[in-house]
Amino acid sequence: MSDNIEVIIRTFVAFILLWSFTCILGKQTIAQKTYHGFIASITLGTIAGNMAFNIKINSWHFVISLLIMSSIIFLLALIALRNRKARKWISGEPTVVIENGKILEHNMKKLKYTLDSLNHGLREKDIFNIEEVEVAMVEIDGSLSVLKKPHYRHITKKDLSIVTPLVEKIPVELIMDGEIVEKNLIQKQLSTDWLFQELLKRGLNVKDVCYAVMGTNGQLYFDLYNDRISKPIDQE
């Protein structure tokens, strides 16, 4: 077998294995929300990358390495799920950097978190005056969560005594790419006959529809393949 063919085969195998292990380990590995999730993403990617092109090492060694690393990650995630104390050690915990409007320099120092980083995180929250902040904490994924002081917070519907429905419906996708999403119809106890009736009212066929959804207000929205726009805007 030539080196080029071996690299191609190993690349496909590495991708399939990495994809499979990621599906098993869950979405947290992709999001890298925890210490072990971050380490897992780097390590698994490195192993899979080497497996693809490093033909000097037996491919089975990489497979064994991927299996062992995935098992460790899965075990840590399982322990973190069932034990709160262990979860703090495995995943870490948020750290308060501003309390009662005061910067906690000691906590900042422990995190190696600079004032520049703090100001940058606040600006991302549209806060340019630190005096607006009541509490701020650095989450385990490094992001900054902020609670503003009461008089700087946005007005809510509750503040204005605006009554809204207690339960809002989740949007339901009915047609995607010209095909009926049967699973969603069944889950929401809707029939295909009802959907065909709605299409008939609008003079439409399923194949005419690119996307159809029932919104939170219960109204139907249809986007057609033929939008009847004579000069559509084309972003180059």
Image (cartoon, grey):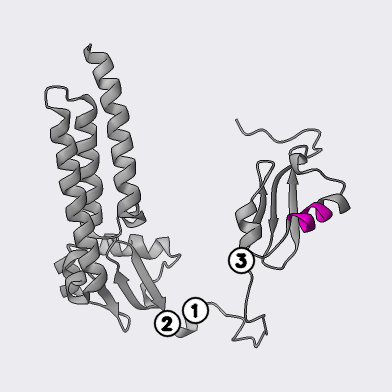
Q: Position of residue 54 (x, y in %)?
A: 17, 25
Estimate the spatial distance between the alpha carbons at disc 2 and disc 3, rounded to whole Å: 32 Å
- Please report contact status of discs 2 and 1: CB closer than 8 Å, yes or no: yes
Horizontal side, residue 139 vs residue 71: left or right = right
Give the mark nearer the N terminus: 1 vs 3: 1
Give the mark nearer the N terminus: 2 vs 3: 2
Tell me if mark 1 has few (under 14), some (14-19) or many (20+) residues whose alpha carbon lies within 10 angstroms of its own: few
216 versus 160 height, above or below: above
Q: Residue at x 33, y 57 (%)?
A: 28
* Quadrant where the C terminus is found in the figure: top right
Q: Quadrant of residue 102?
A: bottom left
Please indicate, yes or no, whether residue 52 appears anywhere in the rendered image. yes
Q: Which residue is mark 2?
A: 149
Q: Which residue is mark 3?
A: 170
Q: Which residues are magenta?
A: 192-198
Q: Which of the two marks, 2 or 3, is nearer to us in this view?
A: 3
Q: In what element is the residue under mark 2?
A: loop
186 versus 54 height, above or below: below
- Amino acid under disc 3: Ile
Q: Position of residue 118 (x, y in %)?
A: 30, 64
Q: Quadrant of residue 31?
A: bottom left
